[in-house]
Amino acid sequence: MTRRSFFALAAAPSTGRLPRELEWTPGPVNRLRWRLADSTLAVYSGPADMLLLPEARRHAIGDTSARQVLVPASALDRFRRPDALWNDFASQGRLHDYDNQTTRWPVSEIPAAQPVAAGQTLRFANQAIDVLSTPGYTRDGLSFGLNAGGLRVLATGNLIHAGGKILDLYSLQDSIPDWKVRGYHGFAARIAALRQSLAAIRQWRPDIIAPASGPLITNPGADLDRLEETLIHCYANYLSTDAYRWYVSPENTQARARRILGTRAFNPMPLAETRPQLPSWLHTTANSRLITAPNGHALLIDCGIKSVPPQLRQWRATGLFEKLDAIYITHYHDDHTDYAASTASEFSAAVWSCPGQAGILREPARFRLPCLTPNPIPHLDIWRHAESRDWHGFRLTSFDFPGQTLLHGALLVEPPGGDPVLFVGDSFTPSGMDDYCLLNRNLVGPGLGLHLCLALIERLGRPWLVNQHVAPLFRFSPEQIRFQQKQLEERAALLASLTPLPGANFAVDEQWLRLDPYLHSVSPGAKTTLNAILTNHAPSPLEFSLQLHTPGGWACPNPRRRIRVAPGQTATIPFPLTVASAGFPTLSVSAPGWSLPAWSEAIVRLA
């Protein structure tokens, strides 16, 4: 990357305010260097005698050549033994993932890494350096404060960007142990920790904030306030249509609101109309539904829980149905798919799904997404979007339905002489939209994500909805549909103001740039291809530059590529290569005015 290809969406402010002993070098990873006597201290990127790294994120780590590299103590293993952690993640953590932390960890060992903890006071050339606890963008984030030439300068990593922004919202996904909320359900839960971090920064009273990327922050007070206000509004917006509210007590919802909003109120949508009495043709087991026709044929919606196959055997034995024709998969999450392939084989049933999730159902190892099953479904009957078929007196229509997750479907069932029912997977509950896991890729904007789903529900005449985790049928009023759409519009505007990247969906799409396949097994010396899958969430065309970084001994004849991508479009860029060993290739990306080093990764193992 060229020196001019650095992350700076606004003109970098003059560094004339910095004292002579401080040097600020903007780049894909910024560098703050402090020279005293014959010693050099650097933050983010060396070379230096002492290097300070506030967080364990690849895109915040530059040149690590230094005699001493100080890193957050709680993340020490990320720096010292990355291979072991990546191998554990490949074999275990990647599957059934309900922790849902982004994986932009280091892929190369830093042997000189030494732990430092919040509250310590470091010494450099007889000068004090304060170490602050500033979790938020990462769980383990630290900030380093120094006093040089009468200026108080604080290095905060990616905690805050100039203009009161933050790179993305999905990095704030986290659990809330006090209320037994798993990471999967903890929409941006680390906003609470980030607010505490902002308070600690205010108390330290910096004159200048030196972030890991982007320009220096020369008006810290205003930017801290702006970031905090935007995040508060984002969370209040989310809570207003929170599907999770249906599953938990009012005390849980109030506690989640208080820890981030404090005394501020939010405006919850009234609960949708419900219908506890199911139609005679619909039967429940775990989070699956069985549709039965009068002639003994049956259709199963999802099959991810261990108790479902025995229940099907019992129902068949007692005459509820004679022949299971198919299993329709609403979405790829493990609790909806773990037993689909084996059950389809046992009952000689087809597996139906929508085009959007064909790839992930057939080859889940190619993806890095929450709640992955280890069990592929190789044999699929893929229905076209909005394709209809007659099935034993019922009319069935399948849709791509990017609701709870981007790769998601829905099945409209129109029974003879009855009300139509739309099986929406986990996309809605009577309290609103199921978007509590940001890593599911819930895109915002007209014609996208849940906005598209709401428009489809309205166009279908507001059928009764089935969420397999919700006992009654339910449906939204026209006013509730409009309320949810309005909240999504407001969220899009908030996200656009939050991220320094040129589009709201960069803030919520953790996989806007990914390597495919994510997990790949090859023989040593084999030729293979890694594909960069890139979505441009900007409102205008962008010229992207990509660079693939491979482990030593690998051969990639063309590791640098350029491509122009239209707004809202997704491009595939192949990187043919020869693999010499197991390893973790990464992919850097830049566009005019910004650059993100080692942003995406893949895991390659030897077959």
Image (spheres, rainbow, N blue to C red):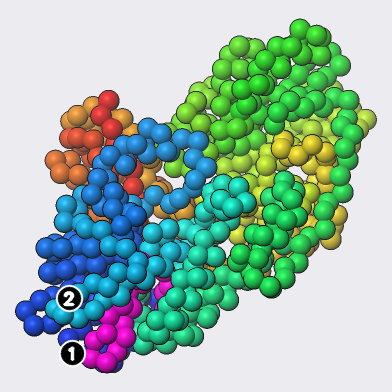
Residue 347 visible to an observer of this rendering: yes
In which quarter of the view is residue 40 placed? bottom left
The location of residue 363, given as percent across then percent down, is 46, 31
Q: Secondary structure at mark 2?
A: strand
Residue 469 or residue 561, whichever sits in front: 469
Which residue is depicted at the point 43% across and 38% down?
A: 94
Which residue is depicted at the point 16% across and 56% down?
A: 112
Q: Which label was assigned to residue 124? A: 2
The location of residue 582, given as percent across then percent down, is 23, 35
Secondary structure mostly taken by the magenta-highlighted segment of the chain: strand
Which residue is depicted at the point 67% across and 42% down?
A: 426
Q: Mark 2 to mark 1: distance in Å?
A: 17 Å
Query: Would residue 171 appear left or right of 118 to someone viewing this image?
Result: right
Task: Assign the C terminus to one quadrant of the image.
Answer: top left
Q: Which label was assigned to residue 588? A: none
**Magenta segment boundaries in residue numbering:** 142-162
- Residue most toward the front? 120
Dot 2 alpha-carbon crowd within 10 angstroms: few under 14, some 14 to 19, many 20 or more: some
Amino acid marked by disc 1? Arg
Task: Assign the N terminus to one quadrant of the image.
Answer: bottom left
Dot 1 alpha-carbon crowd within 10 angstroms: few under 14, some 14 to 19, many 20 or more: few
- Residue most toward the top? 317
Residue 289 or residue 522, whichever sits in front: 289
Q: Which residue is mark 1?
A: 20
Residue 446 visible to an observer of this rendering: no
Q: Which one is closest to the eye, mark 2 or mark 1?
A: 2
